[in-house]
Each structure stands twice: as structure tokens, then as C-alpha cells.
Image (tube, coloured by chain):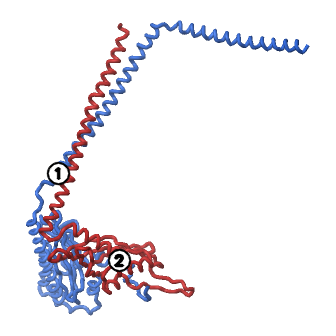
Chain colours: A red, B blue
Amino acid sequence: MKKFIPLIIALALFFVSMLYNNVFVQDKANQVLVLKEELQIKENDYTVKKSSLIAENEIIIEQATGVTEQRKEKDDVVAEAFITDVVSWSSFAEYLNKKDKVSAEYVLDADFLALFFPDVLVAVAEDGTVYNYIDTYELSLSLYSFRSYVTNVNADATRYTYFAICTVASFNNGGEAYKQFPIMYTVDANGMMSDIKGIL
Amino acid sequence: MAKWQNKQNKSAADLLAQETLDKMKARNDARKENFGEFMSKWSFRRVLGVLLVFLPLAFLAGAIFIFNNTNESLRANDAAIASLESQIAAKQSEIDALAIPQADAEYIRTSLNSARVAGVAVADLQNKYCGLKNAFHLNNTAANGNLLTENAVAIGVYFNDDEHESRSVAQGSWYFSERVEYTWTFETTYEFKAGSCECLWTCYSKDGVLLAYATSVYDVTSGLFGDFAFFQTLAGTSYTETSDPPLATPTPEPEPTAPTTESTVVEESSAPKTTTKVTDPTPPLPSDLEPTTGD
């Protein structure tokens, strides 16, 4: 019988360790699951409350200022798309396309077109090859940043007037430079831009 | 004869086969005998004795392995529990912050009005600079210099001394030209976000040409403008570059104790500190190109 004592002790230790594993580890694992669920509930609660607060705030700000954040964001999208069409091109062909597009889609005065789409130097070689300044020097422009300020809202809050500050990045033959300029415009409730003025 | 020969051959083959078979049989028997001998040495007691040594060791090793595994799992779970509890506490704080009453319409209107009043005051002080600087140029006296300094100090009161050096930048003249009449205007602010208002001033000539503009953020709590910057347009720059003859020679100051004002912060700050913003390198914009032929 004495020979069996070590085996009995070893067996007892083995079963105790299995019991310990099952009871305690399982318990902690359950705690982790419960906490994960609780965290998920809190995150959902936060999201719902935040959305509702943002909506309330917008109403309050609209009551106080006559301006809605949503409307400004919509107008910013429209204006940024316009400015991108004006100052983003990377070849002479694209430059001409953008000029035609912008002239057709927006009401722009001659000053604006002359400022942002001036005539480009074009030369014809003896062999008939046509060279233009943009492609020869690999000029390109792209919109770098855009920030708008509401400067006026009409009486029925349908037309917002803006003063926007744009930064354009220009590249040529490996060189890079940035230029900031303002543009003024009005956007109506349908997202149509008018009274567009640009200054360098 | 052939038949007899065949018969002889057959019996030789048979004998060989029989011999091989016998050898294999003998080898098998020997193996069985060895195994039997081997097995006969291992009695049940002996086997049991070996098992009683190895089994406890095996169970002990298993117990130690399970115990170590359990401890590791517990440690990992404890860490996960601590992390989750802190995330839950943080999320609850965020939820509680949402419950704090937000600004109402009246508060926002009051804040915007404060920004407007301060912005208009700053615009008026900037407009005052034009006359003061002209007077100083014509008559380089301490009195005129002091007026410039006072104007700078008056402007500085509205600005925060922040990381953008808003106060020292804003204190100077944002735009000056003797060749054009201009007016700074504070553009009414409509935007209110998280206790601050984005503000804008514009400087137009009498003919309606935009010469310069400035931006800032008005903090409602402190009542100060910060994050200030000002910029000139090309038109504005063209009016500041001049090849006109120098102004009239200033009269010498008779009061020896009066401090000279040429090196005051007013004059230094009147030169825009944000030169790179005002006269950044001319990019290869199409407007700079010589137009010859068209499309």
C-alpha cells in the first residue's frame, strides 16, 4: 500500500490543478466577457448621445447666428470642387480642359479668367512641332488647402457669402512653391455659386 | 536418362528448399525462446513497480504544467480586466461630459457680439495707424513716436501672447501705404465652435481693391484673439513698393532726454513678421507668364 502513496499524491495534485484551472480561469474569462459587453454598451450609448448633442448644438448655433454647420459644409464641398477645377492641372491639355469646363459651368467675369487662366506661351518650331510653356517646363498646380469664412447670410438664410483662403502648390522641373490667395463667392440653397471673385 | 537427370535435379532443389525452411523455423523458434525468456523475467510485480515510479512523475509533471498555464491565463485575464475597466471609466467620463449643459443661443449671441466689438476696435486702431505713421514720417518726433507706441499697446490688449506670437505680430501695422487710401474692416463673424470664433479682417482701398486681410481665433473665455496672421495681396504689395522720392527730412528733436523711437518695437513690428507669407517666392503660376498666343 505504501507503494501507491506517491501515485495517489500525484493523482490528487493533478486533479486539483485541473480543478483550479477550470474554476478560476473560467471565472476570469467570464469577467472579461462581461466587461467587454459593458464597454460595447457604453460606446453605443456615447455615440447616440453625441449625435443627438451635435444635432441640438446645430439648432442652437443656427438660432444664434443664422448659420448651420451642415449648410456650410455642403457649400464648402461645392466651393472646394470649384477651386480644385480652377487650380489643379498638370499639362497644357488639362489646363485647357479645365478652362473650358470652368467657363461653361460657372458664371465668371473676364478678370477672373484672365487671372487664373491667362494665355499660355505657345511656339511653333520650324519643323512644325508645337511647344507650350506648361509642358516644356513641366508645370503643374494643385490645391493644397482651403478655409472659408462666412461673411454674410441673407435675410432668409438661403444665400451664404464667403471669403475663402486657398493655398495652391505649384511644381516645375523638381521645384516646389506655395501661394496663398483669397476668393469671394456666394452660394445659394441649391449649391449654385455666384459673384465669384479671385485675387492673387 | 533425361528423366532420371530431371528427377535428380528436382530432389536437389527440394532438399535446398527444405533446408532453408528448416533454418527459418529454427531462427523463429530461437526468437520465441528469447522473447519468452525475456518476458519470463518481467513479472507482474516488476511491471507494477516501474509504473508506480513513472506514473506519479507523469501526473506531477502534468499538474505543474496545468498550474503554470493557469497562472499565465489568470495574469492575462487580470490585465485584460484592468484595461477594460479603465476603458469603461474613460468612456463613462466622456458620456458624463456630454451631459454638461452646452452653450445656449443667448450665450452664443453674446460671445459673437464680444468678438465683433473687439474686432471692430482692433480694426479702428489699425486704421488709426495710417494717420500716425504718416505724421511720424513727416515729423520724426518723440511725441509722434509715442503715439505709435500707444496705438501698438492698445492693439496688444486684444491679443493673446500665444505660441504664434499673436500679440507682438498684431501690435504692428498690418498694412501701410502712402500711395493709397484704405480701410480695415472687421468681417462679422458667424461661426461659433467650442467656445471660439473664427475672425477675419479685410483691408480694401477706396476703389474696392482688396489690399490685405488678417485672420484670428477669438477665445470667448479669455476674450482675446489668438492664432493671428495677416497677408497682403499682390495689389496691396504693389502699393507698398515705391520708387517715389524720399519723404521730407525729419526735423531734429530738441529734447535730448526724449527716447529715440526708430528702434521701438512699433517700427520693427510694423514690418510684417510673416514676410514669408506676404512675399513668398513667386510660384510659376500662369498669371506670371508672358502671354503671347492663346490656346
Count residues near mark 2 (Cα–Cα under 10 Å), then give few for <14, some for 14-19, many for 20+.
many
Task: Say what secondary structure mark 2 lies in.
Answer: helix
Find residue B132 and report its horizontal and vertical position in percent.
15, 85
Marks 1 and 2 sit apart, C-alpha to C-alpha, by 44 Å
- Residue lying furthest right in this view? B1
Read off the residue under disc 1: B95
Q: Nearer the viewer, residue B260 or A186?
A: A186
The residue at the point 14 percent across, 77 percent down is A155
Q: Nearer the viewer, residue A148 or B281?
A: A148
Find residue B83 and report its horizontal and vertical position in percent.
25, 42
Looking at the picture, does residue B102 appear above or below residue A120?
A: above
Read off the residue under disc 2: A86
Q: Nearer the viewer, residue B163 or B136?
A: B163
Find residue B129 and report its horizontal and vertical position in percent.
16, 82
The residue at the point 37 percent across, 72 percent down is A142
Q: Is residue B264 visible?
A: no
Q: Amino acid at mark 1?
A: Ile
Q: Please tell me in which quadrant of the rendered image residue A100 appears.
A: bottom left
- Indicate the quadrant containing the C terminus of chain B: top left, top right, bottom left or bottom right: bottom left
- Indicate the quadrant containing the N terminus of chain B: top left, top right, bottom left or bottom right: top right
Say whether mark 2 and mark 1 are on the same chain: no
Looking at the picture, does residue A42 appear above or below residue A9?
A: below
The residue at the point 11 percent across, 62 percent down is B103
Q: Please tell me in which quadrant of the rendered image residue A3 appears.
A: top left
Q: Amino acid at mark 2?
A: Val
Q: Is residue B199 visible?
A: yes
Q: Chain of mark 2?
A: A
